Amino acid sequence: MADEVRERPQREQRFEKRMSDAEALMWNVEKDPWLNPSGASLIILDRPPDFEHFRKQVAAAVAEVPRLMDRVVGGLGRLQPPVWRPDPEFDLDFHIRKMALPAPGDMRQLLEMATQIYQDPYDRTRPLWQYIVIEGLEDGRAAMVWKIHHSIADGTGAARLSEAFIQIGRDAPAPPEVDLDAVLAERLATDDEEGNNPSVLDSIVGTTTHFMRRQAGISRRLAGEMAMLGADPLRAGDAIGGVVKVVNQLRNELLGGGSAPEEAVGADGEEQLPGGSPLWRTRSRHRHLEAMAFPLDQALAAAKGLGGSLNDWFLAGVVNGCVNYHDERHTPLRTLNTSFVVSTRADKAIGGNSFTPTRFAAPAGPMDPAERFKRLSEAMATKRASVSGEGALSGLAGLANLLPTSLVTSVARSQAAKMDFATSNLRGARRRFYISGAKVLHCYAFGPLAGTAFNLTAMSYAGEFAITMHIDPVAIADPADLRDCVEAAYQELIDLGTA
């Protein structure tokens, strides 16, 4: 029992008053539903949670984590990123809801309901998160969908935030009652004292000062670099090399480029065939979910047996599955345009964003599955090594935020349409946990399509490696068959790697 009520470790909170440029960009482009940058989690429970107990858990989390009570307030024009301020009309019951599946309450119905919940847009005047408890799942089970906007946290930061509402025992007591009205009143008073309610004139002055300071910082760094060149001649070469590296990375981020695989490049060094799937050219705002799961120990053993990592196994399986899907339709491939996320986080804090999306062309021509695994492993290692700091995305976001949103979303749509799929791999809890008396059986995370044909997101939890496919069913005509092809490809790699 002592283990069941053990307090969770207190983590640092990584929340700033003002959005970063990258977070502001995610906030702005969401005005186009095709480019929704946020994800969600679907949690399967062995029984319905004690709703009142859960409500107390979330109330305690809101009192502990100020960002859960904050709404977004835009700056003056587009000269500075939005800020976070307490929502004076915060209503916990708006953010915690309960629904029920109609009979028979099977997994397909649950996935469809989760898709609908995901597609419901956020109320942009309120805090950007929501919990939906879903009862009526077959065999007496229940589920929960957790939505949180990407501007609050990336996948890692959100996973750490989830510690606020989970327990390690079924009978863990509820936290003490929290007076959220008093908490809100205190935060609003503090917000006023800190001068976060400026007059129009103060807003203009503050915005102008922020913009000039931002530009001055860029100029100061450039001037300092130039001054050092005379004292250290070798620095010039290093600086030029650094600029070339950033320019190449920026080109890849904007245009979906990257090193083309050998079979897609001719003797003159030019790419001979357009990359990507010829079947997956159309895009829509429709969404469809598919899910699968594998024993984590088998996936790890297979990756090791094939000479790579779990991430290599994860990417190789989906590429092989996509190749098989196209083979069934007598459509040859040379490359698939894909991306994976490189975390640049160096702390264990909750919240915040520290990641760089990295794009590259995956080899998809005729090839033995084990050979493709090797090729992808080498390509991913090279791409990861090319990412430094926050990557080119952060520098690009500051410029993009000064442009009209319609222009940014138009460019983003056209470039995202060249991407076949995106991937993300999240690390979850190693041991089983509970939510208000209900045991968590499975954890499925699904990431944003953001204009691609599908997103493949994995989450490990309690010895299971769960994979969710978030699909545009207009881009991919037969989502269920794609899922079957991908699942079979993963199993083939397990058989090859553990033989």
Image: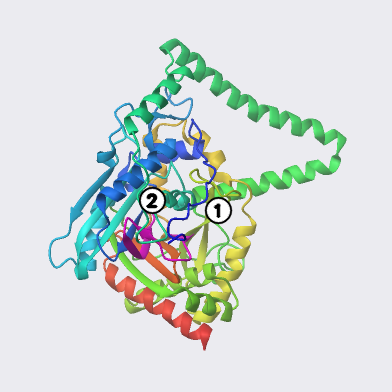
Q: Residue 216: x and y, percent? A: 63, 24
Q: In this view of the protein, which residue sits in the foreground, 94 or 31?
A: 94
Q: Which mark is residue 287?
A: none
Asked whether residue 444 appears in the rendered view, the answer is yes
Residue 339, compared with residue 398, is above or below; it is below
Write down the quadrant of residue 86 in the picture: top left
Q: Quadrant of the N terminus?
A: bottom left
Instruction: Please name the residue shown 64% across and 50% down the image.
Output: 388
Instruction: Please name the residue shown 63% across and 55% down the image.
Output: 386
Task: Indicate the amino acid at tag 2.
Answer: Phe
- Residue 306: within the magenta? no
Write down the quadrant of residue 463 in the picture: bottom left
Alpha-carbon neighbours of circle 1 within 10 Å: few (<14), some, or many (≥20)? some
- Residue position marked by numbered label 2 in the rendering: 165
Separation of marks 2 and 1 at Cα, in angstroms:
24 Å
Alpha-carbon neighbours of circle 2 within 10 Å: few (<14), some, or many (≥20)? some
Q: Which residues are magenta?
A: 422-451
Mark nearest the camera among 2 and 1 is: 2
- Residue 445: within the magenta? yes
Q: Residue 490: x and y, percent? A: 43, 76
The answer to whether marks 2 and 1 mark residues whose Cβ atoms lie closer than 8 Å is: no
Q: Residue 391: x and y, percent? A: 58, 47
Residue 383 as seen in the image, left or right of residue 139: right
Residue 294, compared with residue 458, is above or below; it is below
Write down the quadrant of residue 278 in the picture: bottom left
Residue furthest to the front in view is: 1
Task: Indicate the amino acid at tag 1.
Answer: Ser
Coloration of the structure image? rainbow
Q: Residue 333: x and y, percent? A: 43, 71
Q: In this view of the protein, which residue sits in the foreground, 99 or 180?
A: 180
- Residue position marked by numbered label 1 in the rendering: 343
| First in sequence: mark 2 vs mark 1 | 2
